[in-house]
Amino acid sequence: LAIGPGSALAQSYPAKPITLVVPFAAGGPTDVVARMLGAAMMKSLGQTVVIENKTGAGGTIAATAVARAVPDGYTFLIHHNGMATAPALYRKLSYNPLTDFEYVSQVIDVPMTLVGRKDLPAKDFKELQTYLRANASKVNLAHAGLGAVSHLCGMLFRQAVGVELTTVPYQGTSPAMNALLGGQVDLLCDQTTSTTPFIKSGSVKLYGVTTSSRLKTFPETPTLAEQGLAGFQVVVWHGIYAPKGSPKEAVDKFGAALRAALKDPAVAARLAELGAAVPSDDRLTPVGLQTILQQETQRYGPVIKAAGQFAD
Ligand code: MLT
């Protein structure tokens, strides 16, 4: 089999649509970004990027499916911090995030926001803490399953404020946001790529942001750390993976199309509006993704084991 830049595969790839698997529900932050980038990537790939939402078990069902998919260059996975937390959270994980995939590239960094239903009585974070202490057993915090960043952020928040809230799982933060808009749940910690339009329209209340400094998109809103939760920080990083053994030409071309899409002025402007940041060029590489995955796996593993939250 001839491989290399001049090989038949390099010249003919992609010869058909490519599937990008999204581990959470349609309309949520991962899905929104995947669809935006997939549409822009068509320009350089000359083929459609088909988004497939494979939900469940905090993103591990999708990652399992992609780890087992035929490594022919036509299946990719977009995932976030959940790739690093899953080995510590799931006792019976049937794939190894560090060894069962080809790394394509990191994608974007996204801050998170703590939002509440519009009619929650607390008008700011100070009042929210008082409200939570008085009503803990009645307050519902939505999330997208064990291994979702909304779950990670929610757990860290519960620990930081020292209040045991009731948690309600969904298949992604899009259905969780719908529940918040409908008043069925009270709080959600979610990425700005999902929450920004709802905050701007006043459909939800913003109580704080999870970054170490304030966001350009909401400069008036203090960080949670500024409001008393010392050191509170959760930033979501996304990566693209392929099944182990996928052809290098395919991984390289998909990565190049991704980098071109991130530099597309319309895409870059929309991502900035939604509060997302495009990482430096060295992170938009296979090594860049491998590095962050290794670092974050080491960082989260002991924290999760200490917290004792597991699933089979
Ligand atoms: C989603 O796309 O629904 C979210 O990324 C889920 C999560 O909170 O991890």
Image: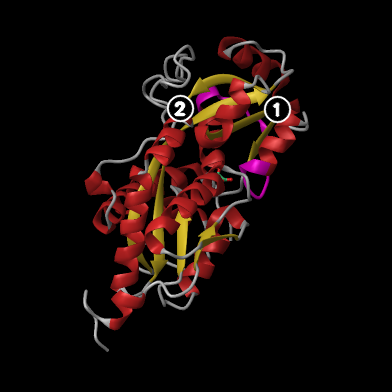
Asked whether residue 238 is in view, the answer is: yes
For image coordinates 68% across by 39% down, the residue present is 176
Q: Is residue 176 left or right of residue 262?
A: right
Secondary structure found at label 1: loop
The mark nearer the N terminus, 1 or 2, is: 1
Please state the extent of the stretch shown in magenta in the rendering: 160-174
Vertical arrangement, residue 26 with respect to residue 168, above or below: below
**What residue appears at the point 65 percent right and 19 percent down from the top-left corner?**
202
Which amino acid lies under the numbered mark 1 shown in the image of this protein?
Asp
The quadrant of the picture occupied by the C terminus is bottom right
Q: Position of residue 285 (x, y in %)?
A: 27, 54
Q: Quadrant of residue 280?
A: top left
Residue 20 vs residue 302, the one in the foreground: 20
Mark 1, residue position: 186
Near-viewer residue (44 or 134): 44
The answer to whether residue 73 is above or below residue 170 is below
Quarter of the figure with the N terminus: bottom left
Judge: label 2 CB < 8 Å from ligand 1.
Answer: no
Q: Which residue is mark 2?
A: 210
Residue 88 visible in the current orientation: no
Distance between the alpha carbons at the discs numbered 1 and 2: 18 Å
The dot on residue 144 is none
Identity, as a three-letter code, of the amino acid under mark 2? Thr
Q: Position of residue 211 (x, y in %)?
A: 41, 27
Report the front residue among 80 and 74. 74
